[in-house]
Amino acid sequence: MALKLIIGNKNYSSWSLRPWIAMKAARIPFEEILVPLDTPRFKAEVGAYTSAGRVPVLLDGAATVWESLAIIEHLAERFPDRAIWPDDPAARGLARSIAAEMHCGFAALRRAAPMNLWRPVEPLAIPPDAQADVDHIAASWRRAREQFGKGGDFLFGEFGGADAMYAPVATRIRTYDLKVDAVAAAYVDAIHEHPAFKSWKAAALLETDTLAADEVDWPVVKRV
Ligand SMILES: N[C@@H](CCC(=O)N[C@@H](CS)C(=O)NCC(=O)O)C(=O)O
């Protein structure tokens, strides 16, 4: 039976992007089911799969998996030949550590600079705790790139689970012109050049539903 991934809006749903891009990059076929966020149908439709009532949700035969990182772990187990995590235990340990940190952390950055793919690139002043998140993320990226990233443009060379977890952060750095070092800036470019990301973003730009909470210029909605 084909895998199904339930996601929210492509412009805003950063958690949905994570498993979606992990699956596309790993060439795992799946059916995408988009349920628009903050609509009357959302709670009913998503709630039918999990009382968490949030996306993403992966349906894989008898398995229903939610939480973006749990989905990526499920995929790594289910498709062991797709190198979602690095083979080398030291690299894998770092990849899992930073992926877990993303999953449970960086609230200040997420609050100050929501993913919003249709907003034109314009600088945004973010508070010191959000900049501290950015600085720590950039340090993790530098560590991964320098120690394990020689085989490609992504954190551990080829695109993998850690890149999937951080792809939305790369968009926040780009959209709000946040201050990062040259290694992080090059990595942000690599994410934006990935064909799977380009295809997600192209679909996002066609969307029309607006979420006030994710528009930092509200009530103005700036669109490219
Ligand atoms: N920790 C969860 C976060 C999921 C989440 O917050 N998803 C948002 C969309 S990006 C959502 O479903 N929001 C709808 C709601 O809370 O009603 C994960 O990793 O998947």
Image: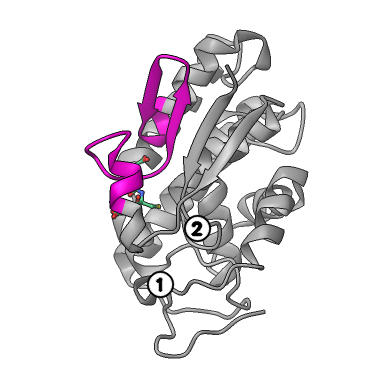
Rendered position, 71 above or below 202: above
The secondary structure type at the circle numbered 1 is: loop
Q: Position of residue 8 (x, y in %)?
A: 46, 52
Q: Quadrant of the C terminus?
A: bottom right
Q: Label 2 near label 1: C-beta < 8 Å?
A: yes
Near-viewer residue (200 or 194): 200
| Residue 211 disc label | 1
Near-viewer residue (224 or 4): 4
Residue range (magenta): 43-70
Q: Residue at x 29, y 48 (%)?
A: 44
Residue indicated by mark 2:
9
Near-viewer residue (200 or 180): 200
The quadrant where residue 105 appears = top left
- Mark 2, Cα crowd under 10 Å, few <14 / some 14-19 / many 20+, is many
- Judge left or right: residue 219 versus residue 174: left
Q: Position of residue 158 (x, y in %)?
A: 71, 28
- Judge left or right: residue 52 versus residue 77: left
| Residue 175 disc label | none
Residue 149 showing in the rendered view: yes
Q: Residue at x 34, y 51 (%)?
A: 106
Q: Position of residue 103 (x, y in %)?
A: 36, 39
Give the residue furthest to the left.
51
Give the residue furthest to the bottom.
220
